[in-house]
């Protein structure tokens, strides 16, 4: 159990590796890095995963590493992937690298998520409080994700537990118990990676964060720390649903439907799989999604039958793709 493996964040020896995954969004990446450099509680390591970007990211990161101003306080590591592995593959690679560097915690987020100055400090404090109240099995802490205008980010709301206010009832008004969240800003302990493994890199994009945070809450819920704030610069502040599929975003939904259908079938059973497929089909019809696109999504539902990734564990050798 976690109690035999976990270092407390209250201890001075506990280290945090910040992990940012980027692909062809150099302008936003620069803002992320400035935000990280301005943290009131600096990470001990900064791992930047370049997901085979084809813009000027590689050249910029070479220059950034040469002139890294926090080298006396923060260990910098740039991981360059040979091919674009999507967000899922990037997070898996970054978390593995954080583990290999000996980090006690990894703090993962996207290249369009801008942590506010106290984000990590508040996240650490909130996690510690949750552990003190609930015990050592708390698997993660996530930040409050807001859109760049200060409103809540519509697509990044964690899923609360039935007793979401348990810690608030004890006077901790900034803590909400949750079962799953996005990877915009999540603090994950080392023991969780050892016990539950890494995100499925094969998912490529979409539902990798939901699956992973659901996986690691089997014994205890996670916690959202509402005064740890990250701004999500995602362009348009709206959620996603199957009525919204069009020719432009169909490639993302194809991954999302395959991944979620695979999860329902292989981890929850045939009935949940069939309910998911029927629901997705009904919503696409009601939304007037083009027939050709609907057929493409149905093919992904069938592809999910044979698509069943296995868990990678960072303490084991990295399997060949």
Image (cartoon, helix red, strand yellow):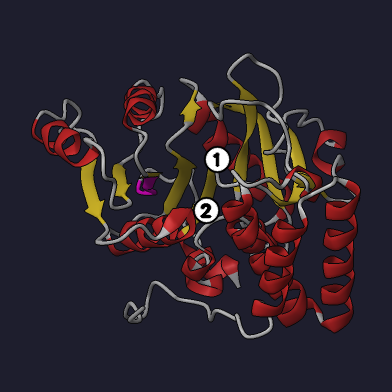
Q: Which residues are magenta?
A: 13-19
Number of the front mark, 2 or 1: 1
Whether residue 218 appears in this view of the structure is no
Residue at the top extreme, as displayed: 149
Describe residue 55's horizontal placement relative to residue 160 as left or right: left
41 in relation to 289, above or below: above
Q: Secondary structure at mark 1?
A: loop
Task: Give the residue displayed 85% in from the left and 43% down from the top.
Answer: 166
* The magenta stretch spans residue 240: no
Whether residue 80 appears in this view of the structure is yes
Describe residue 42's horizontal placement relative to residue 146 as left or right: left
Task: Give the residue displayed 86% in from the left and 74% down from the top.
Answer: 272
- The residue beneath circle 1 is 184
164 in relation to 56, above or below: below
Give the image location of residue 253, x and y in percent: 65, 54
- The residue beneath circle 2 is 188
């Amino acid at each position: 159990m976690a109690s035999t493996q976990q270092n407390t964040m209250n201890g001075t020896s506990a280290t945090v590796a910040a992990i940012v995954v980027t692909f062809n969004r150099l302008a936003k990446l620069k803002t992320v890095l400035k935000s990280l450099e301005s943290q009131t509680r600096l990470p001990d390591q900064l791992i930047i995963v370049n997901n085979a970007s084809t813009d000027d990211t590689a050249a910029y990161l070479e220059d950034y590493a040469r002139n890294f101003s926090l080298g006396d306080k923060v260990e910098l590591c740039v991981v360059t992937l040979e091919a674009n592995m999507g967000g899922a593959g990037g997070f898996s690679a970054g978390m593995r690298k954080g583990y290999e560097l000996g980090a006690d915690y990894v703090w993962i987020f996207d290249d369009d998520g801008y942590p506010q100055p106290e984000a990590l400090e508040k996240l650490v404090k909130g996690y510690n409080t949750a552990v003190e109240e609930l015990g050592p099995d708390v698997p993660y802490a996530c930040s409050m994700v807001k859109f760049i205008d200060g409103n809540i980010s519509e697509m990044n709301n964690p899923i609360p537990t039935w007793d979401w206010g348990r810690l608030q009832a004890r006077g901790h008004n900034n803590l909400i118990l949750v079962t799953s969240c996005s990877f915009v800003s999540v603090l994950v302990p080392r023991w969780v990676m050892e016990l539950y493994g890494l995100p499925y890199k094969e998912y490529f994009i979409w539902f990798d964060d939901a699956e992973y945070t659901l996986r690691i809450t089997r014994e205890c819920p996670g916690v959202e720390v509402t005064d740890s704030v990250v701004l999500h610069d995602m362009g348009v502040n709206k959620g996603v649903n199957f009525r919204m599929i069009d020719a432009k975003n169909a490639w993302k939904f194809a991954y999302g439907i395959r991944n979620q259908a695979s999860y329902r079938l292989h981890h929850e059973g045939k009935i949940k799989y069939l309910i998911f497929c029927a629901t997705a089909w009904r919503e696409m019809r009601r939304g007037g999604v083009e027939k050709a696109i609907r057929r493409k999504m149905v093919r992904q539902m069938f592809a999910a039958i044979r698509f069943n990734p296995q868990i990678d564990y960072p303490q084991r050798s990295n399997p060949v793709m």
